[in-house]
């Protein structure tokens, strides 16, 4: 705390929590067939059984996710086939692919959200599709299980910890890189 600064004191009087309106509900009104809650209703209840309006998937968004996922999955599978490894060895292809996917996800999400005009299909294509297909948590789990069955406990623990730590570091690095670049106006 800086010298001379007064500590912040929080009291009941300093925090106001608004009372919920009588018509508030946990579900949007257009999803419930019963309409708004009656006056004086206490608590929140789900909509009555009846017709629910389900969200509709945009076909072009699904196509963008599918195309990006196919590209990411093909790239990951090609690397895994090109560089096989034993159960007691460090799985470099999966490790590298997961770190690259984490870096790309941090880059794409930050750049698309903060630097470029909004687009309907860029984030599903690049974030969900390419990065989702490229990264492979399930393969990492299978590799860890193989290491454990081969009694390589230290390797399994190190691989899991390094994957998580390096993934977070890659996301942080990519986000910091995007935010350092000046935006032309």
Image: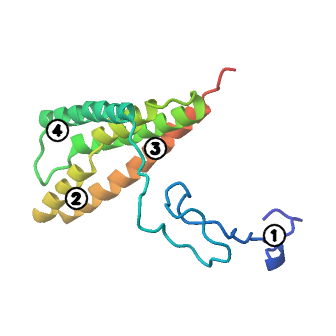
Q: What element carries label 3?
A: helix
Nearest to the eye among marks 2 and 4: give it.
Answer: 4
Q: Position of residue 93 (x, y in %)?
A: 22, 40
Drawn side of residue 140 relative to residue 23, left or right: left
Q: Earlier in the sequence, mark 4 or mark 1?
A: 1
| 161 relative to 173 in the view: left or right | left
Q: Distance between the residues labelled 3 and 2?
A: 24 Å
Viewer-proximal residue among 2 and 9: 9
Against 25, residue 169 (above or below) is above
Which mark, residue 8? 1
Q: Are marks 4 and 1 in contact (CB under 8 Å)?
A: no
Sequence-wise, the earlier of marks 1 and 3 is: 1
Residue nearer the viewer, 75 or 34: 34
Name the mark on residue 83: none
- Label 2 to label 4: alpha-carbon separation: 19 Å
Nearer the observer: mark 2 or 1; the answer is: 1
Q: What's the distance in space between the residues labelled 2 and 1, CA to CA?
A: 47 Å
Q: Residue 171 carries which label?
A: 3
Circle 2/circle 1 CB separation < 8 Å: no
Residue that mark 4 sits on: 80
Residue 147 pos. (x, y %): 15, 59
**Disc 1, SS:** loop
Residue 175 picture location, percent across and down: 52, 39
Label 1 Cα crowd, 10 Å radius (few <14 / some 14-19 / many 20+): few
For label 4, the crowd category at 10 Å Cα-Cα, with few meaning under 14, some 14 to 19 and many 20 or more, is some
Kindly state the secondary structure of the residue where label 2 is placed.
helix
Q: In this view of the protein, can residue 177 be seen by the observer?
A: no
- Circle 2 packing at 10 Å, graded few (<14), some (14-19), many (20+), is some
Q: Who comes first in sequence, dot 3 or dot 2?
A: 2
For the image, the number of numbered tags is 4
């Amino acid at each position: 705390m800086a010298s001379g600064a007064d500590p912040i004191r929080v009291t009941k009087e300093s925090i106001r929590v608004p009372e919920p309106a009588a018509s508030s509900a946990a579900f949007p009104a257009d999803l419930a067939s019963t309409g708004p809650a009656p006056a004086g209703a206490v608590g929140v209840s789900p909509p009555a059984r009846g017709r629910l309006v389900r969200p509709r998937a945009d076909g072009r968004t699904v196509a963008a996710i599918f195309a990006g996922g196919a590209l990411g999955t093909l790239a990951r599978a090609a690397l895994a086939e090109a560089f096989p490894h034993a159960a007691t060895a460090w799985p470099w292809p999966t490790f590298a692919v997961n770190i690259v996917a984490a870096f790309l996800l941090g880059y794409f999400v930050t750049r698309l959200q903060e630097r470029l005009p909004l687009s309907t299909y860029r984030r599903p294509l690049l974030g969900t599709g390419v990065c989702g297909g490229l990264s492979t948590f399930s393969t990492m789990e299978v590799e860890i299980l193989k290491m454990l069955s081969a009694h390589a406990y230290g390797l399994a623990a190190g691989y899991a910890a390094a994957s998580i730590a390096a993934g977070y570091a890659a996301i942080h690095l990519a986000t910091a890189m995007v935010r350092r670049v000046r935006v032309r106006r």
